[in-house]
Image (cartoon, rainbow, N blue to C red):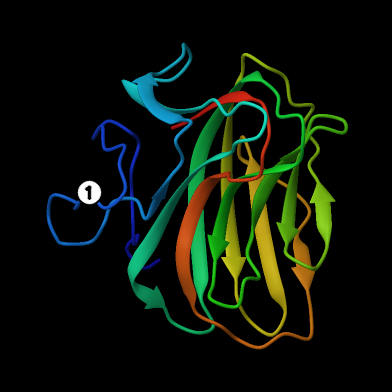
Amino acid sequence: MPPPNFLCGAECGVNAIGTAQPTNTLRHWSTFGADVTVVATPAGRSAGSSYKFNPSAGTGGALLHTFGTAVGSPATVVGRVAIYFDVFSDVTVNICRAGNAAGTPGGVRFNPTGNVLEGYVNGGTTVAGSYAITTGTWYLIEFKTVFATTRTTDWRVNSTAQTQASEGSLTNTSSTNTSYGDLTAHTATWYVD
């Protein structure tokens, strides 16, 4: 597996747009929502810090990292994140995703109808997960989105494979970014580590 393009667990404390990473000149975050802060991690994880998403009605909160060099076509982007909800979102929101210049991302999102996680490919299938999501519990999400002629998102929750989301009849593309959270207006309180 190729080395990761970007890693962050919030221990760095970087919570601003354009802050350079310590070892190079790439920006740590390209977008940093006003309702995202670095806080002490809730119980159940060994990490010292997490990103807290706490948007109120009319706002959203997201972290977006733009790769220094686009992942070549057909791009494969792999992500892993732990999430913890205090208060569920009142609308469907992205949890983690891989993006491209064509605006057809893939990843995992939260749907308040049934309080489920869904794997998705924008414009293609959305597949509900098999976990009953509850507040006060950490969930480990892993995903792999492939930007090929058939766009796919393979994903797991707590190491259990979920049904693949896919969309056909597309062209191969590169990937330019990865993001956590959603700028869609919603009310929620959740953490990413």
Whether residue 96 sits left or right of residue 153 in the image: it is left
Image quadrant where residue 184 sits: top right
Quadrant containing the N terminus in the rendered view: bottom left
Residue 125: x %, y % from top left: 83, 62
Whether residue 93 sits left or right of residue 43 in the image: it is right
Q: Residue furthest right?
A: 113
Kind of residue sitting beneath label 1: Thr
Q: Which of 28 and 168 is in front in this view?
A: 28
Whether residue 98 sits left or right of residue 4 in the image: it is right
Whether residue 131 sits left or right of residue 70 in the image: it is right
How many circles with numbers are drawn on the protein? 1
Residue at 14% of width from left, 60% of height from top? Answer: 24
Residue 150 lies, with reference to residue 80, above or below; the image says below
Residue 160: x %, y % from top left: 68, 41
Label 1: how many Cα within 10 Å (few below 14, some 14–19, many 20+):
some
SS assignment at label 1: loop
Residue where numbered disc 1 is placed: 19
Q: Residue furthest left?
A: 23
Image quadrant where residue 153 sits: bottom right
Q: Which of 74 and 57 is in front in this view?
A: 57
Residue at 60% of width from left, 65% of height from top? Answer: 145
Residue 23 seen by the camera = yes
Residue 181: x %, y % from top left: 56, 42
Residue at 59% of width from left, 38% of height from top? Answer: 60
Q: Nearer the viewer, residue 120 or 92?
A: 92
Residue at 67% of width from left, 28% of height from top? Answer: 57
Quadrant containing the C terminus in the rendered view: top left
Residue 29 lies, with reference to residue 1, above or below; the image says above
Residue 118 lies, with reference to residue 11, above or below; the image says below
Residue 93: x %, y % from top left: 69, 42
